Image (tube, rainbow, N blue to C red):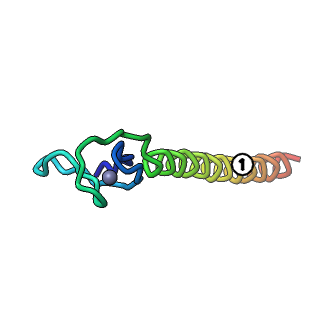
């Protein structure tokens, strides 16, 4: 759900507003003005940052598994070579 940040041009108040398709245009909670300036949503930025970090940690986790698997393969290979000699 998109949360936008607005600044009221009438009184300068900044507020966040959850925009629903059914609700009309937002109004200033202080002076009820509709003369609002839309600001960049901090929530959108921070959630994008969180997603990026989640992806990075998932990747790190996956490469950790891959290393573990390789290690396991090496052990099997060494055991195999040891058998032959
Ligand atoms: Zn206002």
Mark 1 lies on residue: 67
Is residue 41 depicted above or below 17 in this figure?
above
Please count the marks in the image.
1
**Residue found at x 28% / y 60%:** 29
Residue 70 percent coordinates (x, y): 71, 46
User: On the picture, is 19 further left or further right than 52?
Assistant: left
Residue 16, image quadrant: bottom left
Disc 1 within 8 angstroms of ligand 1 (CB): no
Q: Please tell me which residue is depicted at 22% across the width and 49% down the height of the picture.
A: 26
Identity of the residue drawn at 67% across and 50% down: 69
Q: Nearer the viewer, residue 27 or 5?
A: 27
> Is residue 13 found left or right of 80 in the rendered image?
left
Q: Spot the residue most to the bottom.
A: 30
Q: Is residue 78 left or right of residue 59?
A: right
* Residue sitting at the far left: 22
Q: Secondary structure at mark 1?
A: helix
Dot 1 crowding, Cα within 10 Å, few <14, some 14–19, many 20+: few
Furthest residue to the right?
A: 85
User: Of residues 57 and 6, which is closer to you in this image?
Assistant: 6
Q: Residue at x 74, y 51 (%)?
A: 76
Q: Is residue 6 left or right of residue 29?
A: right
In percent of width and height, residue 57 lies at: 61, 52
């Amino acid at each position: 759900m998109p949360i936008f940040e607005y600044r009221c041009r009438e009184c300068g108040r900044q507020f966040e507003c959850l925009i629903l398709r059914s609700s009309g245009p937002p109004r200033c909670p202080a002076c009820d003005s509709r003369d609002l300036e839309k600001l960049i949503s901090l929530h959108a930025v921070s959630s994008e940052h969180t997603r990026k970090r989640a992806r990075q940690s998932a990747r790190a986790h996956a490469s950790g598994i891959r290393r573990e698997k390789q290690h396991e393969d090496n052990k099997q290979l060494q055991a195999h070579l040891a058998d032959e000699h």
